[in-house]
Image (tube, rainbow, N blue to C red):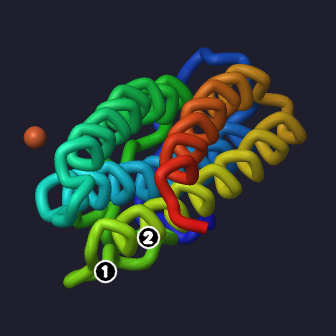
Amino acid sequence: MQNFPMKTMHSTKNSVKEKTRKKVVAILNQTLADLTDLYSQTKQAHWNVRGPRFYSLHKLFDDLAGAVEVEIDPLAERITALGGVAAGTVRMAAANSALKEFPTGNDEAGYVAALVDRYAQCGAGVREGIDETAALGDADSADLLTGLSRELDKSLWFLEAHARG
Ligand SMILES: [Fe+2]
């Protein structure tokens, strides 16, 4: 989770200690990579889904992608507010994301199942990040991740309600 090329830390009068800021920035950059990947995978599902429930799933996937997208900017800006460098390009996300690539050639049930896995994985990672940032004493980052995890849980519920079995 901490294997990031963006090690540069800018000086800041922010009272969070530099040692703490570095660790939090690594956690938040991992989350940024995962979310950027999750956003693009959800759009991929939005564009390519086919089947009898096409229209409702097409709309659902777009709503979920939008809910991820609005979380990305505050997350990246928390990284920079802490003096870090946000690893925010799609290439950086692809290199650092913990998610598997989205499957090709699946029907709508396969798409829902693939997204269930990925939203659950992101939710679990973010919950881990809440505990880690709280233990590091950065309540603000823990709070940001808490709001994010609530959104991911809600999206997971929406997806699971569409899943078979
Ligand atoms: Fe669209």
Query: Dot 1, crowdedness within 10 Å: few (<14), some or many (≥20)?
Result: few
The residue lying at 63 percent from left, 40 percent from top is: 153
Quadrant for residue 121, please give it. bottom right
Outermost residue, front side: 52
- Give residue 128's position: percent from left, percent from top: 76, 52
Instruction: Tell me if I can see residue 89 in this picture.
Output: no
- Give residue 154's position: percent from left, percent from top: 58, 35
Query: Of marks 2 and 1, which one's residue comes earlier in the chain?
Result: 1
The residue lying at 38 percent from left, 69 percent from top is: 109
Q: Name the residue under label 1.
A: 103
Instruction: Tell me if I can see residue 8 in this picture.
Output: yes
User: Toward the viewer: 140 or 80?
Assistant: 140
The residue lying at 28 percent from left, 48 percent from top is: 57
Q: Name the residue under label 2.
A: 114
User: Toward the viewer: 2 or 112?
Assistant: 112
Horizontal side of residue 152 vs 89, given as left or right: right
Horizontal side of residue 134 vs 140, given as left or right: right
- Give residue 91's position: percent from left, percent from top: 23, 66
- Which mark is drawn over residue 69? none
- Give residue 63's position: percent from left, percent from top: 31, 33
Horizontal side of residue 42 vs 117, given as left or right: left
Amino acid type at circle 2 is Ala
Outermost residue, right side: 135
Label 2 to label 1, Cα distance in Å? 7 Å
Which of the four quarters of the rendered structure image does ligand 1 lie in?
top left
Contact, mark 2 vs mark 1 (Cβ under 8 Å): yes
